Amino acid sequence: MKVTATQRSLSQQIVNYIAADNLEGHVSGLSLDSLIHSFTQLQQVLLYGDKSLNVLPLKEDMILEYHKLDIGYIHFFYQLGRNISNDKIANFLDLLNAENFYLQQLENFSARLIGYSNEEVKNFQLEEICILCISIVLIILEIRFIFLPAIKKIEGQNTVLREISFTQAHIIRRPLTNIQSLLTLMLETNKQDAFTKELLTLAKKETDELDSIIKNNVYKSDRNNKMAI
């Protein structure tokens, strides 16, 4: 039946549009709104018919089969709405599952309506395999060009943070510790006047505070690195 074949094509175009949008690509042809509008109209044509398309209203003994198809249609549109508002990969996988469920119901509906020859079944299965392969490729591309670069960027930032932590813990603290030791030694000689001793005491206090800040930063950095691992 031409209408059901068109429905299959439209559902695939909608999924391809969402996949391309997730990858920030471009799809030529009709807009997503136009695809959804046509898809919705043809779903109504399956039930009520359309004289311009030479499609008669559905017979009563097929209403139950149509309701099964309509459940798949509603679920597909629910997942479509989630993808339009949120483009996470998990939602896209749900959309693929919803599309496959709808297409299965559409196949059952069409088989009851006009029947399929063995060759048509083989062609339909081949088409489904092609759709699945394309969907898998799109998911792999999304992981390759979106998620992996983000992970590498985070790993690079963690490397820089570890280098900063090492610099603070060893390179900066070494001369600071030497200065603390010299100030302590000078304060213990008792050869300075009161003013000089006061300046040395203030300097010792500031170096101790600086040393405490560095130790605290190194502790926080080490803890974050352990949590990341």
Image (tube, grey):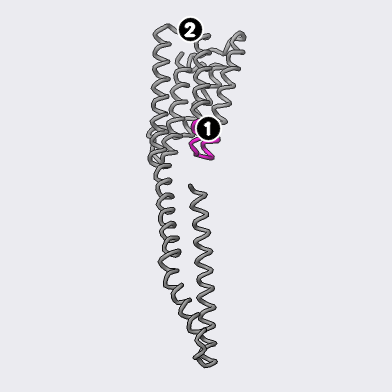
Element carrying mark 2: loop
Assess whether residue 196 is covered by the magenta stretch: no
Please name whichever residue, 36 or 64, is drawn nearer the observer in this view of the structure.
64
Distance from disc 1 to disc 2, alpha carbons, whole Å, reads 29 Å
Residue at 55% x, 24% y is 73
Q: Earlier in the sequence, mark 1 or mark 2?
A: 1
Percent x, y for residue 11? 47, 25
Give the quadrant of residue 130: top left
**Mark 2 sits on what residue?**
115
Please name whichever residue, 207 or 13, is drawn nearer the observer in this view of the structure.
207
Percent x, y for residue 179? 45, 77
Label 2: few (<14), some (14–19) or many (≥20) C-alpha neighbours in 10 Å: some
Assess whether residue 88 is covered by the magenta stretch: yes
Magenta: main secondary structure equals: helix
Please name whichever residue, 218 or 146, is drawn nearer the observer in this view of the structure.
218
- Identify the amino acid type marked 1: Leu
Q: Which residues are magenta?
A: 82-94
**Mark 1 sits on what residue?**
80
Percent x, y for residue 12? 44, 26
Label 1: few (<14), some (14–19) or many (≥20) C-alpha neighbours in 10 Å: many
Relative vertical location of residue 13 with respect to residue 116 in this rendering, above or below: below
Relative vertical location of residue 13 with respect to residue 49 in this rendering, above or below: below
Give the quadrant of residue 119: top left
Please name whichever residue, 136 or 6, is drawn nearer the observer in this view of the structure.
136
Relative vertical location of residue 110 with respect to residue 186 in this rendering, above or below: above
Element carrying mark 1: helix
- Identify the amino acid type marked 2: Gly
Residue at 43% x, 23% y is 9
